[in-house]
Image: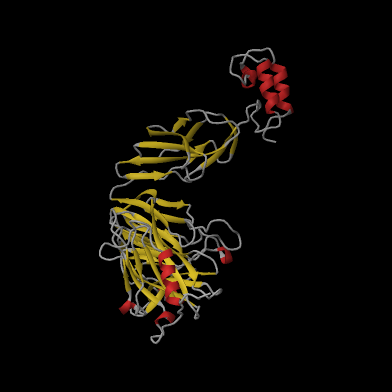
Amino acid sequence: MRIARPAVLLGLLALAAAPAFGRTDYPETEPNDDTTSANPAGGAGGMADGDTISGTTAGDFNFPQNPLQSIDYFLFKNSARPLKIYRHQLVFTSTLIPPNTNNNVLFSSIRGVDVTGFLEARAQQSVSVGTNPRTNVWYGFGKQEQFYLTVRSVNIDQGVSYSGALSTTEVTPVDIGSFVAGSMTISTVGQVGTGLFATDTGLCVYDANLTPVPDFSNNDEPSGNSLQSLLTRNFPAGTYYLAISEFSLMNDQPPASDEPPPIGTDGNRLQFPNMILCSSSAATAPFVGGPIPLNFTITDSGGTRAFAASKPGPWGIYWAKFTVVGGTPPAAFSLSTPANNAIAQERAPSLTWTASAGAATYAVKVATDPGLTNVVASATGLAGTSWTVSPPLNFNTPYYWGVTATNANGSRASTPTTFTFRTRCAGDVDRNGAVGANDLTIMLTCFGQSASGNCAQADLDGNGSIGAADLSLLLVDYGCGT
């Protein structure tokens, strides 16, 4: 049998990897061994979703005498989009070039510069051994961001053929309300665990045009006491965006003026503007599991508010949006009743809270999650400090609720932002949180009587009297809550 020549095999691999109709592939061409000879990926209009980067490499270093055994450099450029926050990713797959049967090892790396701003340095590397795919992730703002990208392999035999496809998702930042213009402090210190369980965080502040505010960033606490973040700055009135993630969160900005001296790669940053990335691929918290916590507080002249946040997967960045106002927004206030963790609540409980000085109206949400995103009942434009839930809630179900006070200068969430309660079991006559012997005793005592006085709560079907239907409902629900 005639053995196909390597050139023919490469051609067949290229045909197999040909992009779908309407998509553009940007293949490597040698020489492309450094930034000065990097292949453009994107052209004038930039790469669109579905476009690909492709090539063949066996290089872990540069060997001018053998271009195949050299690192491949690309100058990636994204396409223009409306001004928003976008999560972009390049997903690489690779194939061994016959006759090779092992060492399918590919590294793709977004390049940046070191703390000096002159020497090339790695910003983020995706690596996987023997497993496809590999992914690089960054966030852009529709401003045609660009960066140098390298692709390399440790296979120095026949090489690895690769293809990387671009995809994009839009990110909606969490609206965390309004704050008073002037000195503000954003902090993760003490909010994301301690000791071995603490998250090493970084944060950056962006303006309304999604441009980083110069010197409004922090990687490590200025005092040097922790690897968590603390930023105190004077915020003029306006709209801002907050990016928080793990260590080595980086854009093109140099370390802030009060940043401790960088350790290792902490001083690395991106070479070009209009993008930001996290260098860590971690997705779960070490030792304890679950999402990596990125909880933070913001303190202004009205007090301190705490916010729950977590890292949205590998290389992920949490985004928040807030407004700084020149006037005075509503003052701090708190939730009252039902008390936090209350049980055996009616299906239409009355929610109450303390008054917020300066508030014009209040808005209430009741949801099945602590973030108040899965809302089941709500009201807006309330002038008073109470509201009866409508429509009625389900029996024996946990709920969360919170209130926001608003005036012409902004809004303020309650402190704490949510309380939780559980509605009663359907047969819970004595309202102690469970259906048992005492409920049955009350039911039998009230049997045949009208639903008044001590027997009012035994009228489970709401028909005005205590009878067989009420007893049947209790027996069906017997043991609930125990």
Q: Residue furthest left?
A: 44
Where is residue 108? Give x, y as percent. Answer: 44, 70
Q: How many marks?
A: 0
Q: Position of residue 457 (x, y in %)?
A: 62, 22
For the question of whether residue 358 can be seen, the reply is no
Residue 221: image quadrant is bottom left
Q: Quadrant of the C terminus?
A: top right
In the rendered view, tell whether residue 39 sits above or below residue 194: below
Of residues 418 and 184, the one nearer the viewer is 418
Q: Residue at x 28, y 60 (%)?
A: 143
The residue that appears at 41% across and 78% down in the rendered structure is 71
Which x, y percent locates residue 240? 33, 55
Q: Nearer the viewer, residue 480 or 225?
A: 480
User: According to the image, what is the colour scheme of the structure?
Assistant: secondary structure
Q: Give the camera-side residue of 159 and 37.
A: 159
* Residue sticking out furthest to the front: 1
Q: Is residue 419 above or below residue 228?
A: above
Q: Position of residue 198 (x, y in %)?
A: 54, 63
